[in-house]
Image (tube, coloured by chain):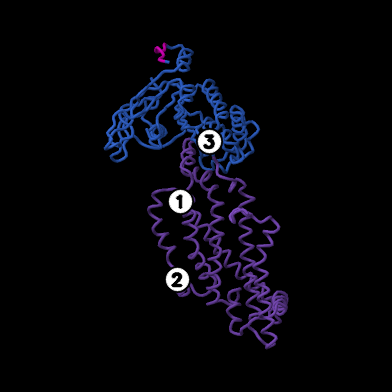
Chain colours: A purple, B blue
Amino acid sequence: MKRLINLRPERGFGIALGALPFVILLAVYVAISAGRLAENADDKLLPSLATMTSTFVRLATEENRRTGEVLLWVDTIASLKRLLTGVAISMFIGLIVGLITGLIPYVQRTLSPLVKVLSMIPPLAVLPILFIALGVDELSKIVLIVFGIAPCIARDVQQRVEELPAELLIKAQTLGASTWQLILRVVLPQTVPRLLDATRLALGSAWLFLIAAEAIAATEGLGYRIFLVRRFLDMDVILPYVAWITLLAFGLDFLLRLVNRVAFPWYGAGIVR
Amino acid sequence: MSAVQVRRLWKTYGRQVVLENISLDVESGEFVTIMGASGCGKTTFLRILLGEERQTRGDVLLDGKPLPDEPGPNRGVVFQKYSVFPHMTALDNVMVGEEFAGAPFTARLLGKARRETRQRALDMLAAVGLADAGTKYPSQLSGGMQQRLAIAQALIRQPRILLLDEPFGALDPGIRSDMHELILDLWNKLKLTIFMTSHDIKESFYLGGRLLVLDRVRKDPHEPELYGARITYDLPLRRGRDARANASRTAPEPVL
């Protein structure tokens, strides 16, 4: 018998193992839900899969009689717009700040302490300030996301830039590169895939800040909807919405990974000897 | 006038003396190998020539002028590793030096200039035996091929001196001897002036036209950092004598 650390599942079996916890959780849910519904058909706490499916289909297809809008898509588009705007701005700020603080000692001395302190401030504690200063509409929500993740992305990018082998920077200089050319041809191309990785890690926090902001002040959005229907104990809306948000988050993460693999084939292709 | 003149050079880090009182004249076209135990300061010496570090005292002159204290295109370099850009294909790796020179703002050449540079880079790749590897990324090349690429990349700007920092240290013996032939061939053809560090005695003797040995002469067992390394041997080798004879100059009597 081999040691446990040397036993590896085969490919198909590995996938089955990965699916197992999901199946178990689902089975447990179905069993408990069925038990509760058998006792009380009006139980709202653990709705059956069928109820959730029909509710979700209704939310995703049925038009509002007054406005002609479909609730799920209105919420999804509103939330994604806020999230993606916030993330895009954060990536831009994070890349620029991280790159020059990582590369240029004078900027590093000047900005690094500030970025460090900013990234320590709990963003949700700043939310009231944002609402007061910027109002309760889109801007404050986007700023919250930016405030929450841009400093982290900047620090991550800065660290990646500092980790670039000194040899590469020296080599570029011996080829006559100016600081600007060095950024353009050597540092930036090597930093972008790392920026995408940093963004993937920051997406979780971005969702958190988005939903928190929507929960407090919004008129549509995925987070808003969940917190709205909480008042009516509408678990058959909340649970599918949570699953939908998870799916969106997973999709974005997958997309970023895909971009990295396709656009930067050299990245992650093993350390260059 | 000598290509490189080093005058009473000292390098210290705080109290620690690394190099003490190094003086040296190197002619254009010499192949100088620098040998010594690890930690003796040979890499530090190379870094000073490169401009990555600054000497504490003394002068380093290149063609009679003080060396600028940052790396520049008159001094090419090949490191043991991380010598090529992982995000560029082999061809781009070689072209990029010319692109830095020709396009200050975009660092990318276009049109005719690009075609000409591309052809030169292809010729250079062929000269180091990488004619078919132009579209490959460094991670797809073997260690030896990466070092060939690094050499081609360093040579495209026609540096006044070429600095090699244990360039073949990480290679297999067979590959290493191929690389020796390549670098000797390029040295002969292009009349390069080369400084190369190595801790391999055979390699140093075989390649060099002139061999420098760095060592600490004075030792204080209680304060080992008190004294730095000096040039303990400066040996003209056969290959150097041949080169000088070819340059029809009078050679000093070879020691080896």
Q: Amino acid at mark 3?
A: Gly
Name the amino acid, label 1.
Answer: Ile
Q: Which residue is mark 2?
A: A126
Q: For the point 47% across and 54% down, which residue is it?
A: A98
Instruction: Give the magenta range.
Output: B250-255
The span from disc 3 to disc 2 (Cα, nearest Å) is 48 Å
CA gap, disc 2 and disc 1? 27 Å
- Rendered image: mark on residue B97: 3
Residue type at tag 2? Val
Query: Percent x, y for residue A150?
Result: 49, 61
Residue B252, position in %: x, y?
Answer: 39, 13
Q: Give the class, few, some or many, for how many residues have Cα within 10 Å of label 3's Cα (few <14, many ≥20).
A: many
Label disc, if present, on residue B251 of the rendered structure: none
Rate crowding at label 1 as few (under 14), some (14 to 19) or many (20 or more) other CA atoms within 10 Å: many
Q: Chain of mark 3?
A: B
Magenta stretch, main secondary structure class: loop
**Residue at image mark 1:** A100
The correct choice, above or below, for B134 with respect to A8 in the image is above
Is B252 magenta? The answer is yes
Does A11 lie within the magenta span?
Answer: no
Are dots 3 and 2 on a single chain?
no
Q: Are marks 1 and 3 in contact (CB under 8 Å)?
A: no
Read off the chain for label 1. A
- Asked if A160 appears above or below B140 in the picture, the reply is below
